[in-house]
Image (tube, coloured by chain):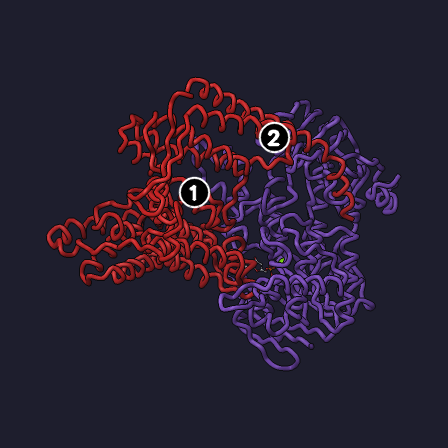
């Protein structure tokens, strides 16, 4: 079914999120939707799926005008949405999650026909190659599988227009590859797909047409064959973007972080880090590469004091921090950019300004004798917002209403606002647009050249190869190998990531 | 490419299992030590008789009596504990130790009871039916709590609804001379209070705990006022007809069980029916699925077109009706009139039952029975003149709740979004 959005406008307090946006998708087509953080992609899709009401504009499906007052009407019209933040009930199993809202019932009490629903789920997952255990609980599933559940949800409702909002941000390369296969299978069957991403390579690979948004308006629509990464990046940001970080050779000095034979357990009391030794020197960037779930998360949490280690030694700037509190670690000059910004990086219900001083509210100039100094706080936060180009209506905006990428910038701006000796950055650019990635990479290199030691954990090969001076690949809780950044190849890192020799 | 993660899990199972085994051995040892204590107690108590009697066909009629000795009771309890402790240590994590506690605990209760009675006859039909009677309002209140919390609304105003229901029920029943009218009016008033709580929490996003506290205090104030200013002068408004016990034909003729289960007030039967009904509704129907989704992850429910706000209003109205019914039970069943503050904290006990029962109606009923049982034992003790400080007995259920919630049940988790206001974009 052909879908058209015409002149859609949506205003939030202080932001024009969608400014007369028109896009269209044909039957069986994949439309790539690009745009920097805060460009209005998610807002537009929320309007399409009936969650938000547009201030102006209309939605046409197969030529007829449809205006949705609630998600139900959008679902009935065949629109399926996989949200940027998954919308699944953690304690439900797969069958319940998929059927929720579209249950078939029997009897006058409305008994949920679980057996029938389960059959449909199994049938759909076989038909579309979506490998899922129908009886597994959502909270026990890895993100890649949760995403398949989300897609199943859309298929279960017979959606013929499927929206995927940054589906690959949390996926491994192999999972992304599987996802593309699924998308191609669906479009071959006549489904239209809108695919939102920040990864230019992916959109060039999978999309039939690409529409780029900038600051709430359409900046252009192109065909993958007629464009390039550079042109797309330029359209998104409105200027040329360096897709490769420019940096000089590292000048490593003394050891800042030393990790020796460290063993760490995960939450399920299994050994996740099984004896890792690693050194990071002042003035170098070390990247820990690897597929998600090989112990990187636990290693980072151990270093910054969020997780106690089972054995081994962690020394930062000459001080043993094995039993140090997170604040003590921070006071040693450690900046931490956590993997899950919504859980460990920000307090979602507090303002940008409050989040900006979370790590140093207890110190001058922000406070003295327990009293906060509102002016200093506001001035510093405003400066951070300017320096990092954070798109927010004001510093009093609640952090959760910022777009994902801008939330990440708040974290980075805060962590770099102190004098930093060591930066521990887990997935520092997850969900960021190319412009912001360039910006954050430049800042990391800047910190390095100013003499900080930098440890980056990333699952993105591109990122690792772009910024690292040395690359340590983690597999199954151990360091599988350490490579020199300058001479490392995609293939060499990839093989180590898979555990190969 | 999740193989990496799987590999981590498989190769590290060893460590997790070793920990489990160590914990199991520790638990086994503790249980076995308890058993040894019981055996020691048994050694001196074989001369003391323990006599439990049950009414056979009707209360006050012929009785069936079990006669044994306190020593014997301790011996059985102790041996069971030692065997179960041993099995726990031997089989490790595979042994269903939580369930096994349901075997040990009653045996210990019987032994302790026997020891306290010191040879006197204990009529257990009285104790058990007393427990059931007391469990009625607590279970109804807990059902109210479960429905609201499962839909995402914290409901600590059950106590207040009890009071309002009790007062409304007594007045309406007295005025009309009909018990049914009393119950209906109590239900309506309960729903009104429930609606108010929902309106504060949903529409105005008042913190749900604070709204609940306000309503509880308000309910005390209003019912006290009505009692002192209206009912004290017009006693005809506070002399309701009381609800009669009904013997269910045929079933009440079953020996032992008849007088216990099938000769109670209609409230008992209604409560049991609601218990089964809501267990089914919550876990087997579309209604329940949507209600639970609203309480666990409202945004997920909303994105598939479920009206979270409506569900929460409805569940609060239902909860109000249930708590109102429980309130009317207080004034229309046993007491025969409304008294100031007559809910006496039972609304909060209902909340404890919600947690103890892990937000599950049947579990909450079990907890309510336990609370009722300890109350009934206490009255038995005072009738028989056994010298145990009532405060001590009174506090036992709460100590058990704390122990169970903190340790035994493990990670009981309430609905994830309970208490969080939900706003649609
Ligand atoms: N509920 C809301 N209330 C207020 N402002 C909002 C709300 N949702 C989005 N915004 C604002 O609207 C703008 C567009 O946000 P949107 O989430 O659509 O961006 P996006 O293109 O999806 O970005 P990202 O790539 O970072 O996810 C942002 O400036 C954001 O702060
Ligand atoms: Mg978005």
Residue B15 lies left or right of residue B227; in this view the side is: right
Relative to the observer, which residue lies in front, A282 or A186? A186
| Mark 1, residue position | B367
Picture quadrant where residue A192 is located: bottom right
Identify the colour of chain A in the image.
purple
In the rendered image, the residue lying farthest to the bottom is A63
Relative to the observer, which residue lies in front, B391 or A421? B391
What chain does mark 1 sit on? B
CA distance for labels 2 and 1: 25 Å
Percent coordinates x, y for residue B423 in the rendering: 48, 59
* Whether residue B324 can be seen here: no
Helix, strand or loop status at disc 2: helix
| Mark 2, residue position | B88
Chain letter, colour red in render: B
Helix, strand or loop status at disc 1: helix
What chain does mark 2 sit on? B
Which circle's residue, 2 or 1, is located before the other in the chain?
2
Q: Is mark 2 within 8 Å of ligand 2?
A: no
């Amino acid at each position: 079914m052909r879908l058209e959005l015409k002149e859609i406008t949506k205003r939030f307090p202080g932001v024009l999120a969608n400014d007369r946006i028109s896009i269209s998708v044909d039957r069986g087509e994949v439309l790539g939707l690009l745009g920097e953080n805060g460009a209005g992609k998610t807002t537009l899709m929320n309007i399409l799926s009936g969650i938000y009401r547009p201030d102006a504009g209309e939605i046409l499906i197969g030529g007829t005008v449809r205006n949705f007052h609630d998600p139900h009407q959008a679902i009935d019209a065949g629109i399926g949405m996989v949200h940027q933040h998954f919308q699944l009930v953690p304690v439900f199993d797969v069958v319940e999650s998929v059927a929720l809202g579209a249950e078939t019932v029997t009897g006058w009490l409305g008994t949920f026909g679980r057996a029938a629903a389960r059959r449909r789920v199994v049938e759909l997952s076989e038909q579309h190659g979506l490998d899922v255990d129908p009886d597994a609980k959502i909270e026990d599933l890895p993100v890649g599988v949760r995403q398949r559940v989300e897609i199943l949800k859309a298929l279960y409702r017979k959606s013929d227009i499927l929206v995927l909002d940054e589906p690959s941000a949390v996926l491994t390369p192999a999972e992304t590859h599987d996802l593309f296969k699924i998308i191609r299978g669906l479009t071959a069957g006549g489904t239209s797909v809108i695919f939102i991403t920040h990864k230019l390579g992916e959109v060039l690979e999978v999309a039939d047409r690409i529409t780029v948004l900038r600051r709430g308006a359409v900046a252009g629509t192109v065909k993958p064959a007629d464009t390039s990464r550079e042109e797309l990046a330029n359209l998104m940001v409105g200027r040329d973007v360096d897709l490769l970080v420019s940096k000089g050779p590292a000048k490593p000095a003394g050891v800042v972080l030393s990790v020796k034979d460290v063993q760490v357990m995960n939450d399920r009391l299994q050994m996740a880090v099984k004896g890792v030794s690693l050194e990071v020197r002042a003035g170098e960037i070390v990247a820990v590469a690897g597929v998600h779930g090989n112990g990187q998360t636990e290693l980072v949490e151990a270093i910054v004091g969020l997780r106690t280690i089972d054995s081994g030694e962690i020394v930062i700037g000459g001080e043993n921090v094995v039993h140090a509190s997170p604040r003590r670690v921070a006071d040693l000059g450690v900046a931490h950019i956590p993997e899950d910004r919504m859980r460990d990086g920000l307090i979602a219900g507090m303002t940008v300004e409050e989040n900006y001083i979370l790590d140093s509210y207890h110190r001058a100039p922000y406070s003295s004798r327990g009293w906060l100094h509102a002016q200093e706080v506001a001035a510093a936060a405003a400066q951070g917002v300017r320096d990092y180009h954070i798109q927010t209506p004001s510093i009093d905006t609640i952090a959760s209403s910022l777009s994902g990428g801008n939330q990440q910038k708040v974290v980075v701006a805060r962590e770099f606002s102190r004098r930093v000796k060591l930066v521990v950055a887990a997935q520092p650019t997850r969900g960021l647009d190319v412009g912001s990635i360039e910006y954050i990479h430049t800042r990391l290199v800047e910190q390095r050249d100013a003499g900080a030691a930098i440890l980056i954990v990333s699952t993105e090969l591109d990122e690792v190869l772009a910024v690292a001076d040395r690359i340590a690949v983690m597999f199954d809780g151990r360091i599988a190998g350490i490579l020199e950044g300058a001479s490392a190849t995609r293939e060499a890192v990839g093989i180590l990531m898979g555990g190969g020799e | 490419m999740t193989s990496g993660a799987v590999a981590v899990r498989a190769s590290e199972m060893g460590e997790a299992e070793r920990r489990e085994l160590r914990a199991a051995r520790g638990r086994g040892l503790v249980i076995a030590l308890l058993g040894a204590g019981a055996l020691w107690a048994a050694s001196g108590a074989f001369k003391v008789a323990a006599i439990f009697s049950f009414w056979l066909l009707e209360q006050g009629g012929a009785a069936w009596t079990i006669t044994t000795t306190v020593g014997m009771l301790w011996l059985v309890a102790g041996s069971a504990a030692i065997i179960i402790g041993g099995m726990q240590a031997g089989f490790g994590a595979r042994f269903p130790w939580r369930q096994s506690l349901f075997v040990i605990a009653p045996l210990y209760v019987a032994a302790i009871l026997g020891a306290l009675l010191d040879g006197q006859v204990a009529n257990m039909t009285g104790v058990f039916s007393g427990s059931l009677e007391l469990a009625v309002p607590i279970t109804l209140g807990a059902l109210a709590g479960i429905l609201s919390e499962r839909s995402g609304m914290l409901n600590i105003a059950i106590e207040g609804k009890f009071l309002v229901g009790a007062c409304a029920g007594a007045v309406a029943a007295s005025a009309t001379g009909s018990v049914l009218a009393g119950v209906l009016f109590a239900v309506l008033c309960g729903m009104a209070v429930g609606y108010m709580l929902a309106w504060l929490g949903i529409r105005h996003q008042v913190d749900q705990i604070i709204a609940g506290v306000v309503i509880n205090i308000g309910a005390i104030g209003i019912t006290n006022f009505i009692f002192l200013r209206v009912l004290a002068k017009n006693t005809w408004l506070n002399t309701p007809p009381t609800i009669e016990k009904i013997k269910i034909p045929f079933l009440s003729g079953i020996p032992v069980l008849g007088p216990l289960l099938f000769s109670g007030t209609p409230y008992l039967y209604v409560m049991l029916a609601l218990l089964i009904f809501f267990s089914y509704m919550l876990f087997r129907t579309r209604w329940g699925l949507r209600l639970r989704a609203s309480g666990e992850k409202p945004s997920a429910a909303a994105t598939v077109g479920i009206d979270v706000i409506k569900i929460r209003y409805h569940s609060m109205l239902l909860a109000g009706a249930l708590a109102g019914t429980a309130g009317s039970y207080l004034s229309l069943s046993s007491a025969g009139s409304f008294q100031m503050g007559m809910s006496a904290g039972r609304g909060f006990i209902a909340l404890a039952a919600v947690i103890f029962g892990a937000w599950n109606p049947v579990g909450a009923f079990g907890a309510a029975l336990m609370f009722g049982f300890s109350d009934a034992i206490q009255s038995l003790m005072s009738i028989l003149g056994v010298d145990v400080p009532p405060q001590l007995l009174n506090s036992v259920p709460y100590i058990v709740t704390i122990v169970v919630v903190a340790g035994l049940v493990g990670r009981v988790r309430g609905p994830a979004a309970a208490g969080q206001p939900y706003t649609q974009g």
